[in-house]
Amino acid sequence: MKKFIKWIASGWMLILFFVGFFLFWEYSIPLFDIPRYILPSPSEIVLKGSADLDKLIYYTGVTALETVLGYIIALILGVGFGIAISFSSILRRTLYPFFVSIEMTPKIAFAPLFISWFGFGLMPKVIIVVLVCFFPIVLNAILAFNSLSNELTLFYQSTGASRLKTFFTIRLPAALPQCFVGFKYAAINATVGATIAEFIGSDKGLGFYISIVTGNMRPDLAFAGIFFLTVLGLTVFGFVTMMEKILIPWHISMKRINK
Amino acid sequence: MKNFIEVTELKKVFGDGEDEVHAFGPATININAGEFVSILGPSGCGKSTLMLMVAGLLDSTSGKVEFENKLVNGPKTDIGIMFQDNTLVPWRTVKGNIELQLELRGLNLKDYQEQINNILKSVNLDDFADRYPNELSGGMQQRAAFCQAMIHDPKIILLDEPLGKLDAMTREKIRADFQKLWMVKKPTVIFVTHSIEEAVQLSNRVILITPRPGKIDREINIDLPYPRDLKIKRSPKFTEYVNSIQEVFHKYGVI
């Protein structure tokens, strides 16, 4: 009960903060005489943005498709490679160091190359999203599947259970919490990848929209685009967090108790 | 007649060349069926290493282990095993964790429902069957882990300092639980510990291991009647056993 009141109180503080932030923004523009082609006020963003709503919604769909498609492909590849590397000593000595060294490269630097190789369509954007999402997923999956305690390993060995059975009853559930660390990190990266890919070369999508309207000196519309990108990012992240709660409820409750 | 478990000149060396660490042995041990044997020694003497080699969970450098004349050359599966850090998984309830042992062995869960209830009752955990491990105290977790290790009625139980992290009062209580279950089911128990009192209270025989590389200093038969309750623990004979063992370790400068 006490915790609940505390939660409500902290929630109110957050709402109050946001209201205060937007009020400050709204009224500091006339106050400091900021020209609207530099920084528009929130009310103007809403007003001008809603006039362009159809386009914004369509472009959100375009960017969402690139993001979600890329994310799902990265998820499948990342977990697949993660498991393969965890269970094969040859891959651990070859692919794993290779992935670690590529992780140090800013993946987004490949974006112009992919655009020039694959053109302006959906595919190069999806590839770039896969690229930025794949590494956090695969590296966390490797960590996850390698961190089973010594005791549990000896325990399942003493039961004589097959590798497949052990995988599904012990190794996989034990690995899920650490896997989700990667999934969540990748979910944050996914929209970033899609947006930047669209900046570089595209004819639709929110990234395309933002770069065009900014070029036309319309920061109000750029902010409207950013707002939709934020909503998209939050939705993707929220979905992954929800999956975490559904798939590993025991992990969430464990964290709550340890607090 | 051969012994139930025969350990012959068993030795373990980890690493090679300059990194070589002589962890245990060589040592020869014979254990009878239904015997409760404690392996007692200071930390780092290789007693856990010995236990894992007996279970076939760790390869030996030289020597051999035989169960009923059969050479051990891979993990033994007719055993129950328990460690200081328990093998309960956080995503299963107490009951689910006991069932984990059965599921991994491909046993039919339906046939064991009554036994699960009975074993939980015997360690006073019957009200906690549907709780998750992180909702239990350390002592309750170890009792649940004990049920997990015992549910399939293994002929051999291996206990690696299972009470190591518990407070004195809880240890006392769980020792009594262990003893009760052992007296009913009479499995062969190999109990690794560094508590002299614990070893004397529970065992038919205590095997004293020297500091690393662990070798057998001597074996002491504990000739006291079961169940060994508080009355026995206060008896002069009990104290005598404890003192004589303390003297051995004092000689090595361990205590």
Image (cartoon, coloured by chain):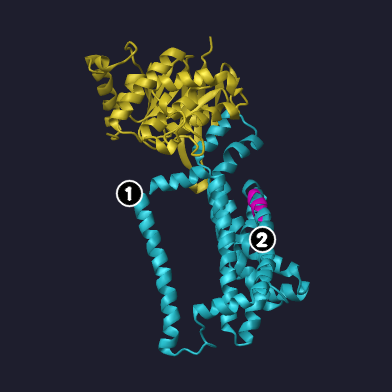
**For mark 1, does the 10 Å Cα neighbourhood hold few (<14), some (14 to 19), or many (20 or more) residues?**
few
Residue shown at 52% from the left, 31% from the top: B96
For label 1, the residue is A2
Residue A154, image x and y in percent?
53, 34
| B167 or B89, nearer to the observer | B89
Q: Quadrant of residue B196?
A: top left
For label 2, the residue is A68
Tell me, yes or no, if residue A94 can be seen here. no
Instruction: Give the magenta-colored segment's residue range.
Output: A78-83
Residue B48, image x and y in percent?
45, 33
Task: Check the image and report above or below for A76 versus A128.
Answer: above
Give amino acid for label 1: Lys
Determine which of the numbered discs, if any, sits on residue B180 in the image: none
Give amino acid for label 2: Val
Is residue A233 toward the left or the right of residue B196 in the image?
right
The mark closer to the camera, 2 or 1, is: 1
Separation (CA) of disc 2 from disc 1: 39 Å
